[in-house]
Image (tube, rainbow, N blue to C red):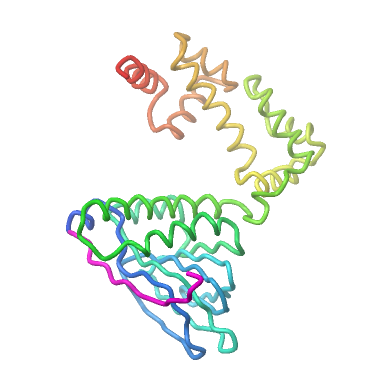
Amino acid sequence: MNEKKYFEHVYSPSGFARSHLFFPLIGGFNKMSPEFYFERDYYPAWEFLYVTSGKGWFAINDQWIKLEPGDGLLYDMRLPHKYKADPEDPYEMMYLVFNGDEMKHLMEKWFPSPSTLIRGTAGKDEYETTLIRILKISDSADDKEETETNILIYQMLTQLLKYSRAEPKDLNRAKPEALEHGRMYMEEHFSQAADIQDAAKAAGLSYYHFIRQFKRFYGVSPKEYLTKLKIGHAKKILIYSDNQVSEVAEAAGFSSYNAFLTTFLQHEGVSPTHFRKTWRLSRYHS
């Protein structure tokens, strides 16, 4: 991309790709003219833009967002949207218009807002590399290339999800010592029904300040982190022991069997008993 060779690919997905895979429709790398302005009411797809240099604006439902170098933008093209370049420093960008059989369902769960903006360079090395790989795949009906593109688009979406869930500039920073004290408290006491209040006290922070700062630096809330610890521990006990499910719930720090069952179903999509049977069978037949 450093050679400034601008291009645009128009892809022709096969029927199989349109029915079963994530697939690109249009992709490219281009520099907009100073007078660039474009608007569209509807297109049945999604687009990811990555600004490599320059500036401009983007609007969805008439809500304008300024775009600068390093910004990544994922949005739903089915809603009215507009673009315009900064006339003094028009933006240069990579872009990918794509769709897929599961896109609507996935986007509603992962990116419920009409647009998701990732500021600065957070995650740049990950999703820029993936986007470049997608754009380099030629227009072909070859099954291997279509399945590879499917994997890459899904990979790009998971990378964007990762960096959209936290303040990106803080994800790679050294974690404040106070927060580490709170995190380690949860690691060491989750099976003893530890709660967020106790973790905040261990960190020496107020309850709400602890919650805000934890999400900022770790990308998840303390509650999500604690639940992940409990569920992970419970899964190990279910696979490697014959303990009753009620005993597993207690050992993992849940206040009751019902609380454990509800949380486990939400996270794993199956009951603890079903999970145990499935994974034990897979172990014995591997």
In the rendered image, residue 31, in percent from the top left (x then y), is placed at 47, 80
Within the magenta stretch, is there residue 11?
yes
Q: Quadrant of the C terminus?
A: top left
In this rendered view, identify the residue nearer to me: 114 or 97. 97
Residue 57 lies, in percent from the top left, at 53, 78
Q: Is residue 223 magenta?
A: no
Q: How many marks?
A: 0
Q: Residue drawn 46% across and 68% down?
A: 49
- Image: magenta residue range: 1-14
In the depicted structure, whether residue 226 falls above or below residue 285:
below
Name which residue lies at 52% across and 71% down: 51
Looking at the image, the residue that sits furthest to the front is: 3
Q: Which percent across, then down, holds residue 228? A: 55, 32
Which residue extends farthest top? 242
- Residue located at (39% from left, 25% from top): 271
Measured as percent of width and height from the top left, residue 164 is found at: 55, 55
Look at 60% across and 36% down and name the residue there: 225
Q: Along the horizontal axis of the image, is 187 left or right of 80?
A: right
204 above or below 153? above
Q: Is residue 247 above or below residue 133?
A: above
Hey, which quadrant is residue 38 in on the image? bottom left
